[in-house]
Image (cartoon, rainbow, N blue to C red):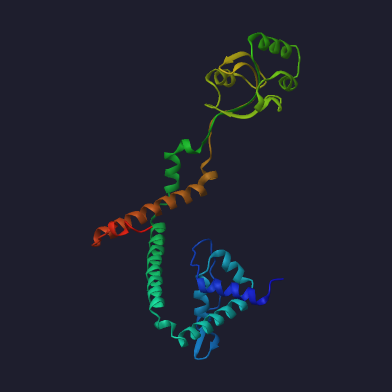
Amino acid sequence: MVPRRLVFTAFLLLVTAGADAHGDKQALEHPPDFDTRVLARVNDAVITGRDFHRAFDALGADQQLMVRRNLTKFLETLVQREVLYQAALRAGLDRDPDVIARLADIRRALLSQELLRREQAAATKATPPDASRRYYDAHREEFTSKERISVSHILVETREKADAVVARLRGGADFAALAQEVSRDDASRDRGGRIPVVYRGQMSRELEAAAFALTPGQLSGVVQDGDGYHVLVLHSHVSAAPTPFESVRASIERKVAATQLDQHFKDLIATLERQADIEMNERALGDVR
């Protein structure tokens, strides 16, 4: 069992960090007057439902799930945070130059993140409802399964051996057993010569022409290429076919949204940089390691 103090410490770090992650999060359900309720007092300070709500919203989805399991413990961490805050004020940390500088950095980062969050919301609303369909239509090849075959082969050194293999197969010999007996292809021999999936472009030109011309169950003649002499049998042949739009719609929507958002942010930064008076002194970094 995890010690209670360690659990509280973990919760306290979680709340203090303020993840502010905008993943798959769910809003906190509460009654209309919750924000005005006083949930706790620490000396002269009060922690309201609004404070609780705001701290909860700043958490990531996984953290919110953990907090939902024990809301009372989460309130205790807010109390602990306030206790620490008041102690820091009594210690004069709010007047420490380093703390003041770090607070300014946090303020800059927070305001920048909030601007991007609002821009993201605006960009998402501006995405045309048919954007995913238009992407699908313009990139059909991306959503078309490739032509493929499943084949077995036997590789030998000479034409004479290959002819003998063909003769034995036509005489009723088992292809897999014969492949294990005589094939020189180390990659497939132990599988009875079986190559489960082959796409165009993965075999030599000679082998591809012969293999893709076969019908399922058909035995080839002798095929020569740079590796030697092959005998093939085709198991299956699947033609190229488009993937239905509805099967890939969700992934396309995510991709389109991410692409458009990325471009929106790039355009935003470019516009703001053009409007700003910016001067960079890269030489000042020359002796920094």
Quadrant for the C terminus, please.
bottom left
Residue ranking furthest to the bottom? 44
Q: Residue at x 66, y 25 (%)?
A: 186
* Direction from residue 19 to residue 161 in the image, left or right: right
Residue 63 place in picture, x, y as percent: 57, 67
Residue 163 place in picture, x, y as percent: 67, 9
Q: Residue at x 48, y 47 (%)?
A: 252
Residue nearest the observer in this picture, 261 or 77: 77
164 vs 200: above or below: above
203 vs 244: above or below: above
223 vs 138: above or below: above
- Residue 266 shows in this picture: yes
Residue nearest the observer in this picture, 166 or 149: 166
Q: Image quarter for residue 224? A: top right
* Direction from residue 247 to residue 97 in the image, left or right: left
Residue ranking furthest to the top? 160
Q: Residue at x 57, y 21 (%)?
A: 212
Residue ranking furthest to the front? 287
Residue 273 place in picture, x, y as percent: 28, 59
Q: How many marks on residues?
A: 0
Residue nearest the observer in this picture, 24 or 168: 168
Q: Residue at x 40, y 73 (%)?
A: 102
- Residue 127 shows in this picture: no
* Direction from residue 127 to residue 242 in the image, left or right: right
* Direction from residue 169 to residue 55 in the image, left or right: left
Residue 183 place in picture, x, y as percent: 68, 20
Quadrant for the N terminus, please.
bottom right
Q: Image quarter for residue 61? A: bottom right
